[in-house]
Amino acid sequence: MSKKRDIRQIEAIAQEFGMDDEERREFGDYIEECKRSGEKGTGANGDFTYGELRDKVGEFRGEQQ
Amino acid sequence: MMLGLIQLREPAKSHNERDLDAYLLQLQGEPFRFFRFSYGDELTLHFGDLRPARSPKLKGRLYGAYILGVRASQWLLKFGKPGMIASQGEGMETISKEAIETKQWIAPNSRVVHATSFAIQSQNVFGLEIRFSDGTFLVIMPTTETESKDDDLPEIADWELLSPSGRLQAGPGLQWSFEPKPDVV
């Protein structure tokens, strides 16, 4: 998946969940941190799918799962 | 003497390069804090006063009052030390994202002395050039990467500057916009 598509996915999630710019930036950093800590998605090259990114919003916000 | 004023309380949208440069004046004089890579290998640069992250999952992380995001654009850093260049691309010594983030490539508290855009007419994009007080030099050059449009994902800017006043975005194409923060309006 292209880098641009990764960023566009974060943008789409931010719009869907009503994130402001600061939260959008933090969400992108959180997903990067997940990736660096070894988490992998089921997409190509271990990328997170859109559905997997959606599922991460709750934990990112510290909401009860 | 010609004096100028920029209204950061109003949304703006234009193709005018000089007006874009006026909005970039926000960044001038701000101290550089650090580099951070975000998801999608996006390089971000943080400037100005620091605040803690809002998310409980990012405890201990700091964020600059000004965040420059290069989005999916190409970037190039020429460091103050002679002969040091960092960029994306082939034919160079490999350097990790962590190395870019942790080493003091830019002298602590170096300030932005110059932030200016430049139109690349042949590619229909706005580039960005930033000079720091220690001599470091950053250039952002948007790519014209073509992507399949068979998805519903939103278009993104070629680069963006988040500031206490709002969000300045350049691109896609030779256009830019400024959106003030809701609480600033």
Image (tube, coloured by chain):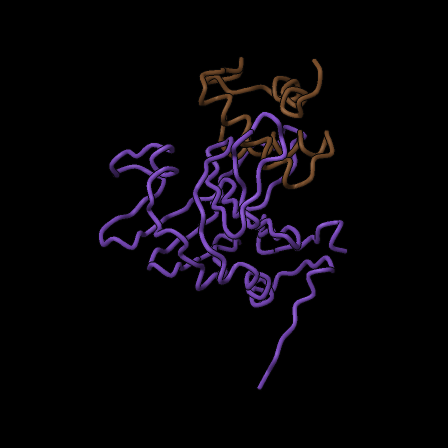
Residue at left 56%, top 33%? A7
Supply the letter of whichever chain is purple: B
Q: Is residue B10 left or right of residue B100?
A: right
Residue A10 sits in which quadrant? top right
Q: Position of residue A5 (x, y in %)?
A: 55, 31
Pick whichever, A3 or A58, lies toward us: A58
Q: Position of residue B159 (x, y in %)?
A: 54, 48
Q: Is residue B60 left or right of residue B85?
A: right
Residue at left 68%, top 30%? B152
Residue B134 seen in render: yes
Q: Is residue A17 above or below residue B146?
A: above
Q: Position of residue A46 (x, y in %)?
A: 48, 17
Q: Is residue A58 left or right of residue A25?
A: right
Residue B57 sits in which quadrant? top right
Residue B159 seen in render: no
Q: Position of residue A42 (x, y in %)?
A: 53, 13
Q: Is residue B57 left or right of residue B112?
A: right
Residue A48 sits in which quadrant? top right
Quadrant where the image shows the C terminus of chain A: top right
State how many labels appear.
0
Of all residues, the one furthest to the left in this rendering is B83
Q: Is residue A20 above or below residue B11?
A: above
Residue at left 75%, top 50%? B183
Supply the letter of whichever chain is brown: A
Pick whichever, B24 or B58, lies toward us: B58
